[in-house]
Image: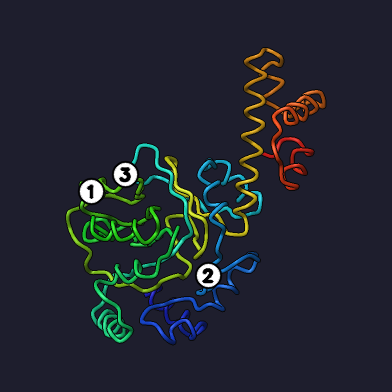
Amino acid sequence: MKKIIFLLLFITLFPAAFADAQVGVFGKQQLIEYTPLWTGERFDDGRPKVSDDLLERMKQVSIEEAWAVCNRHKFFNQFEGNWVITRDNPVLVGRAVTAYFYPQRPDVNDKINENGKKDGRIGGQNSWIIDTITHKDVIVVDLMGKVIDGTFLGDNLANSIWVKSGGTGVVIDGGARDIEGVLQIPDFPIFNRGWDPSYLKDVMLMGINTPVRIGRASVMPGDVVLGKKEGVIFIPAHLAEEVVQTSEIVRLRDQFGHQRLREGKYTPGEIDRKWSEEIEKDFGLWLQEKGDELTPYQKEKLLKGRTW
C-alpha cells in the first residue's frame, strides 16, 4: 500500500514524467533539476555525462578511496556490498542507467504493456531498459532482491548489453540466469544477488532513469558506477573528478612511502601518520625527479599533506 501511495504521489508531483511513456521516467528537466551540482556535459535525456577519460582513470580507484570522498561531502548512502559476482577481481565502471520493478498486478501491468506497444517497444519489459543504453552505460536495476523468477537477464540479453555499452557490465538487485553462457562474454562483470534457471515473471517495470534504491545505496541516473570485489559504490557525477584525482594523489604518496620504507630512510611510524615537514619536502623533490604532471587540484591538495 505504501508503494502504491508513493507512486500516486510521484505522478501528482511529476506529471511530465508520465506524459509520453508507459512507466515512470524522469524527463530532461527533472534530471537536470535533481542533479544540480553537475555543471558539465549532459546526454540528450538530461543525464550527467562524465567524460570517458575520467571513467577510464576511475578503474584504478579503490572502493575505499571513492567512499572517503563521498563521505567527506556528506554522501553517506552510496555503497552496497555482499554481492554475487562473476569474476574473481571484477572492475566495473560506467554511467548509471537506472530502472526498478514492482511486484506485478495484472491491471497495471496490462496498461504498461499496452502503452509499450504504442511506443514501439519490442520484447519483454527488461529489454526495454537495454534499448535505452549507450556507450559506457551500466544498467542498475532494483528487482527487490528477487532471485527466483527475478532473473533480469540471461546470455542473450547479456550479449546485447555488452555490445551496446561497449563492454561494461550490470548491477542487479535481483537474479540472473544462463551463467555458463554469460561467463563466455569477455570482461563483463555482473553484480547480482544470485543465479537461477527460472525466467523473469510476476514483476512489472515501473521506472527507467529515475532515482532508485539498491540495498542501502541511493542511485541517480548518471552516477558513476564503480564495482570491485568489495562491492559497488555509486559516485555522484559532480564528485567523479575529485574521486579520481584524490586517488591519484594517494597512489603517488603510497608509491613514495613504500619506496622510502624499502630504502630504510624512514620508519613505519614516520610514514604511517601525518608526514613531517622534512618528509613532505622529500616527497616534493621525489615528484620533481619523476617529472609527474599534476593538476592544479592535485598540487593544492599535496601542499596540504595527506588527503585521507
Q: Is residue 308 left or right of residue 29?
A: right
Residue 179 numbered mark, or none = 1
Q: Give the residue type that dot 1 points to.
A: Ile
- From the viewer's perspective, is the residue at label 1 or at label 2 nearer? 2
Residue 305 numbered mark, or none = none
* Residue under label 3: 86
Image location of residue 33, percent across then percent down? 60, 74
Residue placed most toward the observer, 130 or 22: 130
Q: Secondary structure at mark 2?
A: loop
133 vs 122: above or below: above
Image location of residue 282, percent across then percent down? 77, 24
* Residue under label 2: 43
158 vs 267: above or below: below
Q: Is residue 166 left or right of residue 301?
A: left
Image location of residue 223, percent across then percent down? 52, 59
Q: Give the residue type that dot 2 points to.
A: Phe
84 vs 123: above or below: above
Q: Quadrant of residue 127?
A: bottom left
Question: Disc 1 and disc 3: Cα gap in Å?
Answer: 8 Å
Q: Are marks 1 and 3 in contact (CB under 8 Å)?
A: yes
254 vs 52: above or below: above
Q: Quadrant of the N terminus?
A: bottom left
Mark 1 vs mark 3: which is more N-terminal?
3
Q: Give the residue type that dot 3 points to.
A: Thr
Q: Quadrant of the C terminus?
A: top right
Question: Disc 2 and disc 3: Cα gap in Å?
Answer: 30 Å
